[in-house]
Image (cartoon, helix red, strand yellow):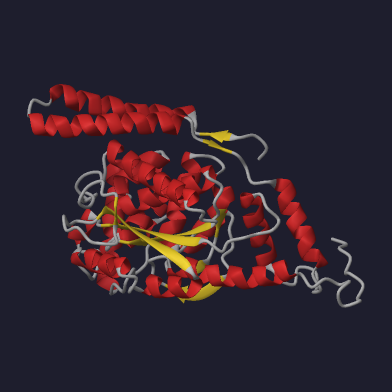
Amino acid sequence: MGDDEKMSNGEIEKLEKMIDELKEELHECDYEPERNALLKKYKRLTVQMEELKKLKITPPDAKMYKKIRSNWDSVAKPLDGMGDFELLTAKIGAVLGDENIDISKKAVIMMCADNGVVAEGISQSGQEVTLAVAKSMARKASSVGRMAMTAGADTIPVDIGINSDESVKGLLQRKVRMGTRNFAKEPAMTRAETLEAIAAGIEIVRGCKADGCRIIATGEMGIGNTTTSAAMAAALLRCDVATVTGRGAGLNDSGLERKIRVIESAIEKYDLYNKDTFEILMTVGGLDIAGLVGVCIGGALYHIPVVLDGVISMVSALAAGRLLSGVTDFIIPSHEGKEPAVALLCEALSVRPVIRASLALGEGTGAVMMFALLDMALSVYKGRTTFDDISVSQYERYV
């Protein structure tokens, strides 16, 4: 990929249509408080639209990638002895544009949101669990909080759509609405809401960049989001629903069958096998997924490597890459989770996760675990004991 990438004209036209629809709502609304709220949103989306029109991705530095691969070959070890970590660290250095790879400043962004489709009985837990876990994240007491402290990473839990009006200290407030609609009955989000969630993700990454962050991880919390991610995976990959739908947090056989039926019905109801990426996202996606789409786009815009967590992050990255070409050049895989969609998503994203531990926790835990592995790999790279240092002839690369 040699030239800078911009959002396609088709996607810009769809986003402009959202603004037009909101303008019509404003024109028809007579109730002043509601009209004022619509006007505020219209102005905000108009500004966001202008920003989105300017979206341009400068590709990672290909020369830097080759330089880092060459540096690895000078380390006193067998060629390719650090395996995939040589490729991944070279990719990180190419994104950062620096052979002296520094990822000491890290953060994990956790998008928290509720999903209306929970009303269909597709999960063991109710929506109250989303808020409970988000509160734990805010206190750095959740699983990802504990792991992030060990890895030396900041945690950024975001309320992008929790179904509660409770204000929680430590949660970044970016709420688009209080949970999505039930996609079994109607589209999960409007175009404007989807755009707002994407823009929030981009904005958060911009803040991370300004704060000196060198690498970010994706995480999420939202009861029902293995249903939304499975629905999106099936629609984006044009594959059988059962192939990409798993048990989530532990559904029994009848629960899994219900989950599959709900997704199949939605795909048929909205004809999703024949719809574009944005339509799929707004119809059966979630605010957490839309926010993570923005995080992936933000990573590409601001040249920060994005370490993906599991299936929900992978679906988000695939959607982001289809909305804006070039985004996936900035993603780093972490683990292969238990959800059945992972294998197909890895193929679609052309990634090969290095952690194969049947993780199924979510929150960004697998991505934060990857931080620690990258730090260890980089300790070898940055220390660079060379063949000259130990008076041994360097291996030659023949293939």
Residue at 48% across, 30% down: 54
Circle count: 0
Q: Is residue 166 left or right of residue 272?
A: left
Q: Residue furthest top?
A: 27
Q: Quadrant of residue 30?
A: top left
The residue most toward the front is 211
Residue 227 position, x and y percent, is: 32, 59
**Quarter the N terminus occupies:** top right
Name the residue located 62 percent from the left edge and 60 percent from the top edge.
Answer: 102
Residue 8 at least partly seen:
yes
Q: Is residue 169 above or below residue 26?
A: below
The reply, left or right, for residue 243 in relation to residue 60 is left
Expressed as whole percent of the image width and height from the top left, the position of residue 316 reads 43, 52
Above or below, 197 relative to 144: above
Which residue shows up at 23% across the image and 68% down it?
Answer: 132
Q: Position of residue 273 (x, y in %)?
A: 39, 44
Depth check: give the residue in front, 337 or 306.
306
Q: Residue furthest left?
A: 31
Quarter of image, res 4? top right
Query: In the rendered image of this protein, does residue 357 appear above or below residue 23?
Result: below
The image shows residue 195 at horizontal and vertical percentages of: 34, 39
Q: Please indicate, yes or no, whether residue 237 appears anywhere in the rendered image.
A: no
Horizontal side of residue 81 vs 47, given as left or right: right
Quarter containing the C terminus:
bottom right
Rendered view: 6 above or below 140: above
